[in-house]
Image: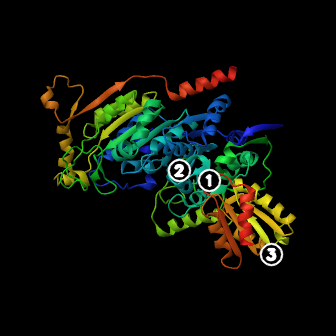
Amino acid sequence: MKEFLQGNIAASYGAIDGGIDFFAGYPITPSSEILETFSRELPKLGKVFLQMEDELSSICAVVGSSLTGKRALTATSGPGFSLMQEGIGYATMAEAPCVIINVMRGGPSTGLPTNVSQGDYMQSKWGTHGDHPIIIFSPKNPQEFYWLTRVSFDVAFYYRNPVIILSDESVAHMRTEVERTTPPYNFNFREKEKIDLPFSFEYDLTTNPFIGEGKKIKITGLFHDETGFPTNEQNKVEMKMNHLINKIENNKGNLFIYESEDLENADIAFVGFGIIGGLVKELKRIFDAKGIKSGFFRPITLNPLDENKIIDLFKNIKKIFIIELNKGQLYFDIKRIFSCDKEINFIGYTRGEIPTITEVYKKIEEFL
Amino acid sequence: MNWKDYLDYSKLPTIFCPGCGIGIGLRAILQSLSDLNIKKEDIIFVSGIGCSSRIPGYLDLDSLHTLHGRAIPFATGVKLSYPEKNVIVITGDGDGLSIGGNHMIHAARRNISIKTFLFNNMTYGMTGGQASPTTPLNKITSTTPYGKYDSNFDSVELLKGANAGFIARGSVYHYNMLLKIVKQSIIYKGFSFVEILSPCPTYYGRLQGFEDPAKFFVKQKDFVYSLDQKDRIDEEKKDKLPIGIFKNEERETFEEIYFKIVESLKTK
């Protein structure tokens, strides 16, 4: 059954259909509808809804709950996302399977609370200090916002890692038809090794006990051994760090999902993520009609990026146009992947709105 | 169960300095759990960052050692995921009253059943003896070489203002009294707050000129007065901290109210 839903509400329903047990959050534009939807729906389902005193406590309550094995989620926007970084770092170290929705608005600082931006791409990847693993998905419309939020718990629990849903003001406030159906993604989940200790360095992915199950486990944000007890023994520290990075790096192929069209036969490719996904698809159609062979590419997984897969997809492409609502953040990653062997052009908009297709078209023509 | 059974002997010795008061405070907590016959699997310890926050690592039960100042929000998430378990927070004066002060008052206001033990050593011991929000005015610390410029918090008054239902202060010098306080706080239904005065001879004591931890320990006796000693004249109470139970009044907890609403929605 199709429903006419706002993106934020669709995401909330996605979390509910994904089995959410626990929500803690703090009001912030443009993500507040998620907080409001859960305040209405979760008590009815016998699940926990908490409005906390700030974003620091929201993320910590969510991580605490997720370490008891509950499906816990919080939602915020730029300034709140900045405050949550310490909690996200803890979640990566403690291998807490929680979900964070960040509805991007204009930044830096308080910035543009009610307008769209894609300025938090890099912050989602590198916002918390130290080397750390992170999984990021970015939806292009309310339907995808629903699907990705719904599947995010499974991904978080499978990888024992926080998952960030990087949405934006436009996807969040747009109202479209949404179907509450099973997410159409295949992440290749397999049977995992069962372990009695809270952590394992031997295997990338394991099923470990949670707090409260009576297994008497310790968890800390300090570097620790497999029993969860703090250590600064160099070999154990290195094993832990390698484990954190490898569990995501070694599974890039399974985690990396994307949308693309005609890249193998085209000369030029349009690239964008999230809300720009529709725009790059439309650009491809316009340039095709003009007789210029083109394709488009939209990564849905923003981290980890499967670099080899991207190199393979773009092997026939000569020119790349990256369109973003920031000053060049996905652009930075794409340039890193291709070094110098392709012409890569960046077109960015940071005035707080999505440009018209005509405006972008004219800009691209200048490059051709 | 004996109090020693709560300890994880494989992780000993502790990192606490010789002469530190944390061990005595921990003993009071474990003795209370033992006296009340609370099973290990019914307890979850949550702590922040600081000397006392290292306690959970030495216990043979489920524990979370979290971020600086954030033990209470983590504990909030744990408690509402396991409402039937005893969730115990270990924090310090820097952890619980400075960086985590806001979480403390909101947890008190909310009245989620978290049992909070705040070890007050009046300094940041883990980082080298800097001034904390409970360091008294004029005292020398490693960041107040000319004497502390600003006044200290009275945690009891702060928690009263936040409407906590159980508020108490004890001292590790007065162990028997501390034990009674801790036990009462564990029985209490709702958010309970116990400040445990615990000397740090390595930094705070040394910087106040105490060469000997034992002498600094004994000093605690002159530093406090018991709430029960009502006949003391005001002059004797001046510049001293009262110890005892300041408030012990039950009110409906957050979980009770929340799950009552959940039940009422089911019948609709």
Contact, mark 1 vs mark 3 (Cβ under 8 Å): no
Which amino acid is tagged 3?
Answer: Asn
Q: Position of residue B9 (x, y in %)?
A: 43, 52
Q: Label 3's element? A: loop
Give me the C-alpha separation between circle 1 and circle 3: 31 Å
Residue at (20% x, 54% y) in the render: B207
Residue A316 marker: 3
Residue bearing the label numbered 1? A117
Decide: few, some or many residues near mark 1? Use Cα within 10 Å; few <14, some 14-19, many ≥20: many
Comparing marks 1 and 3, which lies closer to the viewer? Answer: 1
Q: In this orientation, which residue lies closer to the viewer: B175 or B55?
A: B55
Q: How many marks?
A: 3
Which amino acid is tagged 2?
Answer: Gly
Give me the C-alpha separation between circle 2 and circle 3: 40 Å
Q: Is residue A53 visible?
A: yes
Location of the C terminus of chain A by quadrant is bottom right
Q: Is residue A190 visible?
A: no
Contact, mark 1 vs mark 2 (Cβ under 8 Å): yes
Which amino acid is tagged 1?
Answer: Ser
Q: Position of residue A337 (x, y in %)?
A: 67, 72
Q: Is residue A96 left or right of residue A250?
A: left
Q: Position of residue A328 (x, y in %)?
A: 61, 64
Residue A111 marker: 2
Q: Is residue B158 left or right of residue A317?
A: left
